[in-house]
Image (cartoon, rainbow, N blue to C red):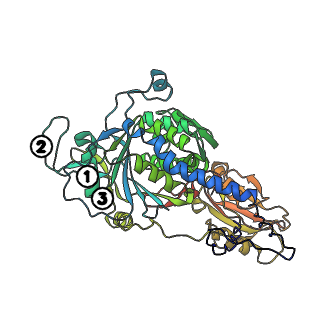
């Protein structure tokens, strides 16, 4: 902004309190200095900034101050003792339940929400907002995790129970939010600052009031249990369909781990939608969203208007790269427990590393330098799963090795022993493949711009690349979905559509 002109020096006042007139050579008083007008853009910028500040502070507080009464309160921290040491930043236990009392019969049928709710936690996430409010770390806790409750009173029968083994989501059924918090704190040694409980209704309303959330999938997603039916591609999901997307558990053998991965992807897209739509700079829009959520959410008594505004202000500077997601590392799948069933047992060393980062307000993963050049091409099959034999289809010495090295560098499992092709006059690079491995072939072809796909029945799982004279380069590729393994940390910009 230009610096305003300095005010002219005022001479000392006379005995009558009036400064003596100054005269120029003509004997007339000089003309008063002309004030320079600020450029219009500067005035508009200052005005806009003032509006934003006022809206986020005074007006924002005014429109939100009445919303606290809409929240159903739970005394989640009543009489809790021997809690973990508080760290920097804010830790929120975000719990999704299967509550569906306020969903219409038509919606129940359309989105396959029939059946009696189990009154247990369908989703459990530990959300850490850094002290500087520049990073959100989200750790998914599998609902089938092996857990041991502390001593507690059963909220249904009123009986006193000693601590005993359960699946993590069963803690809610026995002791509600308080036992859930106590169990999570016992397992993680991370102190929980706030508790938020979201049911099916609030989830659907939130997505609808945002105008939908965009997700993308490299493969068709079809689940007969939830009714999810998405072809490959990019889709804007409204509330009901979004609920199907995050609930689906029968798309592949990974079951709950796969579902948590989609939940993390969806949450990253939700953050992107909220932060890129101007919602957080508009108190009225912010109010509409919070009204939709708070009308059917439960929260601890300390989570009020000030906390909502603080979170809103913090998220204004967020982008997908500001968020990071992981699932607690699993050490043993199918850990059988008498009277409980098959559970997931956490990896003690690796999970401790994750929770230690939350306690110390550190990122879950080390910052990675931003890669130079164009973004990698997203492909349906991870290159690490694709075996490739390279052949030189030209008379150019060393071309086969050059192609083999470049494919290996981007992740493909090459044989590292390139050969000479029978035909040494190939112009266009060829990807030869068995039709049973067509998805792998498409992934490989994406790394070889301009290549030709050639099906060869009976070739087997190893794909063949015949480098032609027109070969120019190998493009970087990466799997469309982040790695499935628990404990892998991904940033929001790695899973949001079009921003990878």
What kind of element bears circle 1?
helix
Q: Which is closer to the viewer, label 1 or label 3?
A: 3
Element at label 2: strand
Q: Which mark is residue 160?
A: 2
Provide the residue designation for mark 3: 191
> How far apart in space, not on screen, are marks 3 and 2 (Cα)?
24 Å
Residue 269 vertical position relative to residue 393 in the rendered view, above or below = above
Q: Which residue is mark 1?
A: 183
Which disc is residue 120 wearing? none
Q: Residues within 10 Å of mark 2 (few under 14, many from 20)?
A: few
Quadrant position of the C terminus in the picture: bottom right
- Give the residue displayed 44% in from the left and 33% down from the top: 201
Q: Nearer the viewer, residue 222 or 110?
A: 110
Vertical comparison of 63 with 102: above or below: below
Residue positioned 50% across, 54% down in the render: 313
Instruction: Return the residue nearer the eye: 365 or 338.
Output: 365
The image quadrant that residue 282 belongs to is top right
Residue 250 appears in the picture as rendered: no
Locate residue 226 relative to residue 236 in the image: left or right.
left
Residue 15 as seen in the image, left or right of residue 72:
right
Q: For mark 1, does the 10 Å Cα neighbourhood hold few (<14), some (14 to 19), or many (20 or more) residues?
A: many
Mark 2 and mark 1 lie on one chain; the one further toward the N terminus is 2
- In this view, the residue in front, 486 or 44, is 44
N-terminal of the pair, mark 1 or mark 3, is 1
Q: Dot 3: what SS?
A: loop
Q: Is residue 365 visible?
A: yes
CA–CA distance in space, label 2 to label 1: 16 Å
Nearer to us in this view, 220 or 21: 21
Query: Going by the image, does 465 lie left or right of 329?
Result: right
Name the outermost residue toward the top.
105
């Amino acid at each position: 902004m230009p610096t305003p002109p300095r005010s002219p020096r005022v001479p000392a006042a006379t005995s009558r309190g009036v400064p003596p007139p100054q005269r120029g050579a003509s004997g007339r008083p000089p003309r008063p200095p002309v004030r320079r007008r600020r450029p219009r853009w500067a005035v508009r910028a200052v005005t806009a900034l003032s509006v934003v500040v006022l809206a986020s502070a005074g007006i924002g507080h005014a429109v939100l101050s009445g919303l606290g009464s809409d929240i159903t309160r739970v005394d989640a921290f009543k009489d809790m003792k021997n809690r973990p040491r508080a760290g920097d930043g804010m830790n929120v236990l975000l719990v999704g339940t299967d509550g569906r009392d306020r969903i219409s019969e038509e919606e129940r049928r359309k989105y396959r929400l029939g059946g009696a709710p189990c009154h247990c936690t369908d989703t459990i996430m530990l959300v850490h907002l850094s002290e500087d409010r520049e990073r959100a770390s989200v750790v998914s806790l599998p609902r089938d995790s092996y857990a041991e409750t502390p001593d507690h009173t059963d909220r249904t029968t009123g009986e006193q129970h000693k601590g005993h083994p359960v699946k993590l989501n069963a803690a809610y059924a026995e002791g509600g939010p308080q036992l859930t918090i106590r169990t999570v704190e016992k397992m993680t040694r991370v102190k929980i600052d706030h508790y938020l409980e979201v049911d099916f209704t609030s989830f659907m309303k939130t997505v609808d009031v945002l105008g939908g959330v965009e997700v993308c999938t490299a493969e068709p997603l079809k689940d007969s249990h939830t009714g999810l039916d998405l072809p490959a591609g990019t889709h804007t999901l409204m509330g009901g369909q979004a609920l199907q997307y995050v609930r689906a558990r029968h798309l592949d053998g990974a079951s709950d781990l796969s579902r948590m991965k989609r939940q993390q992807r969806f949450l990253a897209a939700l953050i992107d939608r909220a932060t890129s739509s101007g919602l957080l700079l508009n108190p009225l829009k912010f109010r509409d969203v919070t009204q939709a959520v708070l009308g059917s959410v439960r929260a601890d008594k300390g989570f009020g208007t000030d906390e909502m505004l603080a979170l809103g202000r913090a998220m204004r500077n967020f982008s997908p790269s500001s968020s990071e997601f992981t699932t607690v590392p699993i050490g043993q799948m199918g850990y059988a427990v008498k009277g409980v069933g098959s559970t997931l047992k956490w990896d003690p060393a690796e999970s401790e590393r994750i929770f230690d980062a939350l306690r110390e307000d550190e990122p879950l993963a080390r910052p990675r330098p931003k890669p130079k050049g164009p973004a990698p091409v997203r492909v349906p099959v991870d290159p690490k799963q694709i075996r490739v034999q390279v052949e030189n289809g030209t008379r150019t010495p060393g071309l086969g090795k050059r192609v083999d090295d470049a494919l290996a560098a981007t992740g493909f499992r090459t044989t590292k022993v390139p050969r000479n092709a029978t035909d040494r006059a190939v112009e266009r690079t060829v990807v030869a493949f068995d039709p049973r491995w067509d998805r792998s072939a498409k992934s490989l072809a994406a790394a070889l711009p301009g290549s030709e796909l050639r099906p060869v029945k009976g070739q087997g799982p190893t794909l063949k690349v015949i480098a032609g004279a027109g070969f120019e380069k190998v493009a970087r590729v990466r799997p469309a979905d982040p790695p499935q393994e628990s404990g892998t940390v991904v940033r929001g910009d790695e899973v949001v559509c079009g921003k990878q």
